[in-house]
Image (tube, rainbow, N blue to C red):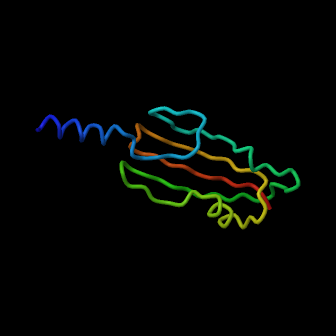
Amino acid sequence: MKKLMFVAALAALASGCVCVGPSNANSLLTLDVQSPDMSFVDNDVKPAKMGAAKAEGIICFCEGDASLKAAMDNGGIKKVHHVDYKVKNILGIIGSTTTIVWGE
């Protein structure tokens, strides 16, 4: 029974409870990866303003709002030119995702 509990606890710890957002590089150690999201690019909008929103987590506890709406609100942006993401992850234990929105 002790072995089963140990295996269950190990599986829970190794599952990567901290979920981070979009990234081009998936690994156990992601220190500073930035990836653009080209689906939002609108060349009719000038990237005059920037807004950012961040979500962070440690083990199974996550907090924050890294949504596009939060980033737009933080930068006072009404029209989006493009969106970037900044991701950090250390062994699935500590992680953060920052959404960066450019627009006007």
Q: Residue at x 79, y 62 (%)?
A: 79
Where residue 96 sits: x, y (%)? 50, 49
Residue 38 placement, left or right of 33: right
Task: Judge by depth and name the residue closer to the eye, 40 or 102.
Answer: 40
Q: Residue at x 63, y 57 (%)?
A: 52
Counting labels gives 0
Q: In the image, is residue 18 above or below residue 77?
A: above
- Say which quarter of the image contains residue 14: top left
Q: Residue at x 78, y 58 (%)?
A: 103
Residue 96 placement, left or right of 11: right
Where residue 8 sits: x, y (%)? 24, 40
- Say which quarter of the image contains residue 61: bottom left
Quadrant into which the N terminus falls = top left
Q: Residue at x 68, y 63 (%)?
A: 72
- Say which quarter of the image contains residue 47: bottom right
Q: Residue furthest right?
A: 44
Residue 72 placement, left or right of 97: right
Where residue 82 sits: x, y (%)? 75, 50
Residue 21 placement, left or right of 15: right
Q: Residue furthest left?
A: 1
Task: Judge by depth and name the residue closer to the eye, 5 or 17.
Answer: 5
Q: In the image, is residue 66 above or below residue 27?
A: below
Quadrant into which the C terminus falls = bottom right
